[in-house]
Amino acid sequence: MENLLEVKNLNVDFQLEQHVIHAVRGVDLCVRPQETVVVAGESGSGKTVTALALTRILPPNARITAGEAFFDGKDLLALNERELEQVRGSKIAYCFQEPTSYLNPVYSIGEQICEAVIFHQHCSRKEAEKEAARLLEDVRIPDPRRVLASYPHQLSGGMNQRVFIAMSLACKPRLLICDEPTTALDVTIEAQILQLLKELKARHGFALLFITHNLAIAKKIAQRIYVMYQGKVVEGDETSRIFAAPRHAHTKELISAYEKIGKL
Ligand SMILES: Nc1ncnc2c1ncn2[C@@H]1O[C@H](COP(=O)(O)OP(=O)(O)O)[C@@H](O)[C@H]1O
Ligand SMILES: [Mg+2]
């Protein structure tokens, strides 16, 4: 099948005062339409930087030094700002680890979702309000009216993550990138969010690029897994094969660490 996203030889450096950090080193990966792909790896291995580079929302001291990232046939790394705007948040949406810090504390949830809906769907205020309530129902928020009138600090982390996922659906993405969306949540809420993503994916047909340091989650949700280590993809394959016959020493270590604590 044609790839929806195809990343080739991605390299990202950070320029520090005294030296350069080569954070992402020649990463290749692809995501097919409607597929769930996990990028796994220990903290600091380059997962987040890889994801941010795709839509060029990197910190100012980062530089993409080489690579291509084809999405829908266009190289995201070669687009100009205006072309990139059309892809960012409209065909590709992001969810992050700390939803609360990406939501604006001074606006109600309803105002923030409406703003996203109006931006993406070019509709009236009234239509946007209807759509906001529908989006909250879509992410299984039981009392949308109350949540629409709330402010982010009045909601739990799990609820804010649902709100953030709802907002990212406003643009009807073809690719949803989730960067450790459940790492800050407790395990029961984590299970609910993973279940929700699975349902939404089935319903809306987007592809999911899910980033996690947690191999148990990777095993549960991924069709394919890329394992990152020190800025490189050291191994990438079907999930069942990664767990049945890991090739790279780091993957073997990770798997046996999880097996030892009974988490796989
Ligand atoms: N803002 C930054 N400034 C300098 N170096 C950074 C910055 N962000 C990330 N890095 C470097 O990039 C590496 C990969 O970071 P990251 O992609 O966030 O890791 P992961 O998401 O896998 O935990 C880090 O180990 C660090 O060396
Ligand atoms: Mg990260």
Image (tube, rainbow, N blue to C red):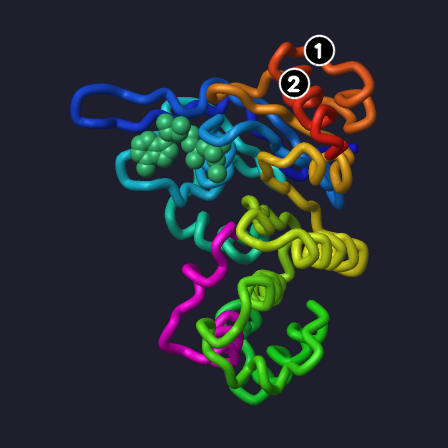
Apparent side of residue 41 relative to residue 259 in the rendered image (left or right): left
Q: Is residue 76 visible?
A: no
Q: Which amino acid type is marked by label 2?
A: Thr
Residue at image mark 1: 247
Q: Is residue 194 above or below residue 258?
A: below
Residue 55 percent across, percent down from the top left = 46, 43
Residue 251 percent across, percent down from the top left = 65, 18
Specify whether residue 10 is painted magenta. no
User: Which range of residues does the magenta coloring cover?
Assistant: 96-116
Q: Nearer the viewer, residue 186 or 148?
A: 186
Mark number, residue 180: none
Q: Are marks 1 and 2 in contact (CB under 8 Å)?
A: yes
Quadrant (top left/top right/bottom left/bottom right) for the N terminus: top right
Q: Which amino acid type is marked by label 1?
A: Arg
Specify whether residue 112 is painted magenta. yes
Apparent side of residue 85 relative to residue 227 in the rendered image (left or right): left
The residue shown at (66%, 23%) is 257
Q: Is mark 2 within 8 Å of ligand 1?
A: no
Quadrant (top left/top right/bottom left/bottom right) for the C terminus: top right
Dot 1, how many residues are within 10 Å of its Cα: few (below 14), some (14-19), or many (20+)?
A: some
The residue shown at (41%, 60%) is 101
Secondary structure beneath dot 2 equals helix
Residue at image mark 2: 251
